[in-house]
Image (tube, rainbow, N blue to C red):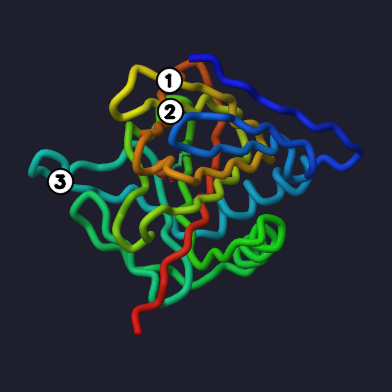
Amino acid sequence: MSILTRQVHTDNRQSVVQQFNLPDASLHLWPQWLEPQRALALQLQLEHELQWAQDSIMMFGRSVKIPRQQVWMGEPHCQYRYSGVTFLPQPWHPIVQQLAIDVSDFLQRPFNCVLLNLYANGQQHMGWHADNEPELGHDPFIASISVGAARRFEFKHRSAPWQLAMELMSGSLLTMSAGCQQHWLHRLPKQSKINQGRLNLTFRYIEAKP
Ligand SMILES: O=C(O)CCC(=O)C(=O)O
Ligand SMILES: [Fe+2]
């Protein structure tokens, strides 16, 4: 499959965007959305100040530790159930809340919760999945910010032999929408040679129940 990408260059790093024209999905990547100093400060501060946990999930009827650490954070109503486990949100850390506001302003989209993942090195990873839990609504719009080591991020279509890989650099913003979670899977594969850590934040929106 040939993927057309369109690149726009101006002085402002936030307006440099790559658009991936995939069947059944929309992906946009701003490779340098955060200033390098802000990306580094964010990584260091969040690594130290959040209550990271190597949670367990259910796989094939067994409880298995995830190969990374995570924090679920956001508005109090944003309970999140995946892989057989319900997560209650930690209250906003002010830096993460400010980032949620900045991303919302930039994309003109609401976000009220975020899954943070901390990968100590390239051995830590996330397997094939889609973020299609019912709480996220019919066609989730997800904004993913990465800081730290650059890592490969891969997509594969659920029913056609199409694949796509990209590099998520420190300070990048990736959006996944328009069918991406229904029709595609994504993963962060192992890259054993990478020794540095990486932190990723996927901002999401969960509607409050009346
Ligand atoms: O670390 C990443 O870039 C993957 C994050 C992701 O897919 C998720 O949090 O659902
Ligand atoms: Fe995901």
Mark 2 lies within 8 Å of ligand 1 (Cβ measured): no
Q: Quadrant of ligand 1?
A: top left
Cβ of mark 1 under 8 Å from ligand 1: the answer is no
Q: Are marks 1 and 2 in contact (CB under 8 Å)?
A: yes
Q: Identify residue type, mark 2.
A: Phe
Q: CA distance from mark 3 to mark 2?
A: 26 Å
With respect to residue 186, does 98 lie above or below? below
Question: Based on the displayed image, in which of its 4 quarters is residue 108 positioned?
Answer: bottom right
Q: Quadrant of residue 6?
A: top right
In this rendering, position of residue 156 left or right of residue 168: left
Label pair 1/3, CB-CB below 8 angstroms: no
User: Could you classify mark 3 by the number of other residues whose Cα lies within 10 Å: few (under 14), some (14-19), or many (20 or more)?
Assistant: some
Q: Could you say whether the residue bearing mark 3 is in a helix, strand or loop?
A: strand
Local packing at callout 2 (Cα closer than 10 Å; few below 14, some 14-19, many 20+) is: some
Would residue 181 appear left or right of 55 to someone viewing this image? right
Label 1: which residue? 163
Q: Is residue 46 above or below residue 32?
A: below
Query: Residue at point 55% right, 46% down?
Result: 144
Identity of the amino acid at label 3?
Answer: Ser
x and y percentages locating residue 203 in the rendered image: 52, 56
- Is residue 48 toward the left or the right of residue 113 in the image? right
Q: Earlier in the sequence, mark 1 or mark 2?
A: 2
- Residues marked 3 and 2 touching at CB (< 8 Å): no
Residue underneath mark 3: 63
* Disc ID at residue 155: 2
Give the distance between the C-alpha atoms of the residues marked 1 and 3, in whole angstroms.
Answer: 30 Å
